[in-house]
């Protein structure tokens, strides 16, 4: 009888799921920023699945004894010093046995390996037990020494390097002393081959879609081939005002600077070049508002006319007024009547100032909408008829701005509506390909 793989026996599903939810909000340095892929696998789940598929269940009677001993040695007896503590803000907390199973769970090699993959942080456990009033932020839900945590993949994180070092050694020991080859014939956005590479494996990835193929190369091949330290001068690999990304401006200057990653340096430079060219051509269509913050987008809503003959107000079709619902940052639209008119004005409410989150679309009405002016219901049949007759309208309801810390939202101003009209006229004059 052969020993089953760990994935066939158990996985810390709740912990992996929590970090996977957090993974959706990651932006800086995440492969999801290369290109939006509709079926992208979360990196924490991919890392856990690859690792658990490559190592045996250490509690099984047929598990090789060297591997079982290695689990206890690396996760109990000889835990690296850098993993015997963690930071919470500026406070250092000691924890000499980071992979000790939860209270009430047997201290076995299998449970040690499961807590190595993902383990709740002491702060989250205290919150679940009712010993702490405040829920820890998403970044502190899991123990910092967990394999699936986002920070573990940071090459500048000492604890992350130690965790990945343990994972790679366990993978090698479980496969005859050599890192195995992982084949992903339907790799898509590249999450699985990327995580297999992080675990020290040779990854072979393939996908029939040419977009996925390009994403795969940018994810797995280009960083390894070109992401190395190198020299750059002010002319070499740099753009001049009249240059284009396909035309590098080489000069005769001998002054050079050493950059830690040539690929990252050039990508950032040419991305800024594209942004500058875009600002020159369409920057006037995104004017800053009274707050002076740059505009990055607009939120719109479809509208339909109220079916009440005595009202006929414009109803915005909104399932919810919430536009942002993150821990510590909730933003919602507000709807108020403009004087005695039958026009709805939109505003912005944040956190505790939010009084209402339900939109105009009625859940029980299967698509019916409630008028914010007269409170009468317009049935879904009227909505369908308006759509088929081309009588659905549109309304700008909020503006997304780029603040120094994060994205923010503000009410629509006359300059925003004017900019849209300009963009609409400009689009009508652009020649479309036949």
Image: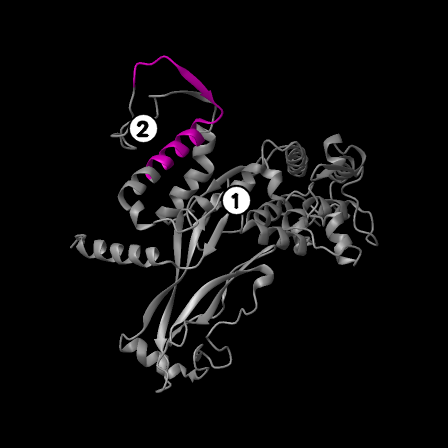
Q: Position of residue 431 (x, y in %)?
A: 16, 52
Residue drawn at (46%, 63%) of the image: 347
Query: For the C terminus, which image quadrant?
Result: bottom left
Residue 256 included in the magenta stretch of the image: yes
Q: CA distance from mark 1 to mark 2?
A: 29 Å
Q: Which residue is mark 2?
A: 239
Which of pointers 1 and 2 lies earlier in the amino acid sequence? Answer: 2
> Can you see residue 109?
yes
Residue 83's place in the image compared with 388, above or below, is above
Q: Which residue is mark 1?
A: 405
Residues packed near mark 1 inside 10 Å, few (<14), some (14 to 19) or many (20 plus): few
Q: Residue furthest top?
A: 254
Report whether 291 appears left or right of 395.
right
Residue drawn at (46%, 71%) of the image: 336
Q: Position of residue 266 (x, y in %)?
A: 39, 30
Which residue occupies the foreground of this view, 411 or 67? 411
Q: Secondary structure at mark 2?
A: loop
Residue 96's place in the image compared with 47, above or below, is above
Q: Residue furthest bottom?
A: 309
Q: Secondary structure at mark 1?
A: loop
Q: Nearer the viewer, mark 1 or mark 2?
A: 1
Residue 199's place in the image compared with 135, above or below, is above
Q: Position of residue 56 (x, y in %)?
A: 69, 45
Q: What's drawn in magenta, residue-wise?
A: 251-274
């Amino acid at each position: 009888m052969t020993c089953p793989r760990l994935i066939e026996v158990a996985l810390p599903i709740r912990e992996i799921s929590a970090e996977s939810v957090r993974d959706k909000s990651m932006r800086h340095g995440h492969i999801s920023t290369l290109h939006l892929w509709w079926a992208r696998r979360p990196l924490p789940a991919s890392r856990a699945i690859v690792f658990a598929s490559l190592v045996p269940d250490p509690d099984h009677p047929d598990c090789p004894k060297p591997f079982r001993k290695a689990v206890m040695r690396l996760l109990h007896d000889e835990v690296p010093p850098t993993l015997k503590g963690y930071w919470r803000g500026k406070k250092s907390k000691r924890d000499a046995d980071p992979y000790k199973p939860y209270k009430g769970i047997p201290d076995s090699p299998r449970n040690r390996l499961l807590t190595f993959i993902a383990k709740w942080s002491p702060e989250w456990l205290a919150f679940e037990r009712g010993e702490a009033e405040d829920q820890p932020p998403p970044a502190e839900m899991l123990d910092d020494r967990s394999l699936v945590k986002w920070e573990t993949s940071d090459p500048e994180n000492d604890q992350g390097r130690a965790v990945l070092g343990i994972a790679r050694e366990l993978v090698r020991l479980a496969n005859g002393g050599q890192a195995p080859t992982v084949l992903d014939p339907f790799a898509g956005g590249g999450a699985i081959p990327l995580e297999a590479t992080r675990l020290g494996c040779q990854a072979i990835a393939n996908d029939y879609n040419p977009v996925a193929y390009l994403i795969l190369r940018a994810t797995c091949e280009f960083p390894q081939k070109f992401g190395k330290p190198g020299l750059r001068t002010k002319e070499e690999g740099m753009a001049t005002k009249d240059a284009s990304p396909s035309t590098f401006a080489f000069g005769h200057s001998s002054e050079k600077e050493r950059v830690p990653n040539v690929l990252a340096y050039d990508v950032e430079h040419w991305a800024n070049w594209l942004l500058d060219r875009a600002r020159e051509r369409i920057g006037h269509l995104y004017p800053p508002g009274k707050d002076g913050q740059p505009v990055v987008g607009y939120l719109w809503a479809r509208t339909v006319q109220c079916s009440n003959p005595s009202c006929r107000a414009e109803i915005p079709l909104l399932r919810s007024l919430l536009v942002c619902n993150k821990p510590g940052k909730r933003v919602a639209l507000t709807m108020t009547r403009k004087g005695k008119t039958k026009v709805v004005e939109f505003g912005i409410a944040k956190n505790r100032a939010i009084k209402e989150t339900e939109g105009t679309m009625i859940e029980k009405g299967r698509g019916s909408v409630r008028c914010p002016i007269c409170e009468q219901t317009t049935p879904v049949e009227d909505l369908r008829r308006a759509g088929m007759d081309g009588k659905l309208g549109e309304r700008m309801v909020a503006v997304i701005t780029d603040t120094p810390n994060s994205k923010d939202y503000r009410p629509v101003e006359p300059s925003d509506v004017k900019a849209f009209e300009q963009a609409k006229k400009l689009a009508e004059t652009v020649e479309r390909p036949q």
